[in-house]
Amino acid sequence: MAHQFIGQLTDKIKGAVFGNVGTMIMFRVGVEDAEFLKPQLAPIFGPRDLINLDNYHCYAKLMVKGQTSRPFNMRTYPPVQGNSETAKVVKNLSRMAYGQERELVEQEILARAKLGVSLEQTQPQSEPRFNL
């Protein structure tokens, strides 16, 4: 589960999530979240350690064969620079494979929402533009 702040969760959800989590990876957090996560890192690390983590560094606590590991620190890789040409190719291939005309999608939404539109009215008037 990923959130920006633990405070965004209700107490009930906090209890459910942190009561059942097996593996935790914790990057730099604010003061409130560090205090909340303190028991997860003790006695190896404290809230101050979590607040002062450098970029791409984190603390982890793993569930291995049903046993929780001691917390440890690790470093992750920075994001790799993307290739804009590759991104264009992937987007176009995705559009060709999965794309539909907006009108067809809107008709399908209306049909599924059962807004008084008959099924015959929702049938495409033409073949999809990107038929592979």
Image (tube, rainbow, N blue to C red):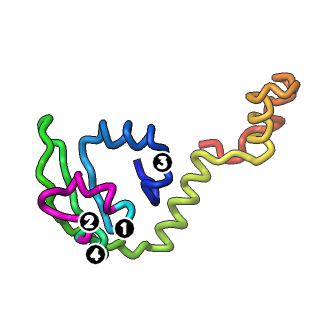
In the image shown, does 92 or 74 lie closer to the viewer? 74
Mark 3 residue crowding within 10 angstroms, few (<14) / some (14–19) / many (20+) = few
Q: Which residue is mark 4?
A: 52
**Distance (Cα) linking label 4 and label 3:** 23 Å
Task: Say which label, 4 or 3, has the lower sequence index.
Answer: 3
Q: Which residue is mark 1?
A: 31
Q: Which residue is mark 2?
A: 47
Task: Say which label, 2 or 4, has the lower sequence index.
Answer: 2
Residue 119 image point, x, y percent: 81, 23
Mark 1 residue crowding within 10 angstroms, few (<14) / some (14–19) / many (20+) = few
The magenta region covers 34-48
Say if mark 1 contacts mark 2, CB within 8 Å. yes
Mark 4 residue crowding within 10 angstroms, few (<14) / some (14–19) / many (20+) = few
Q: Quadrant of residue 31?
A: bottom left
- Which residue is found at the position 75% from the left and 34% from the top? 108
Task: Say which label, 1 or 2, has the lower sequence index.
Answer: 1
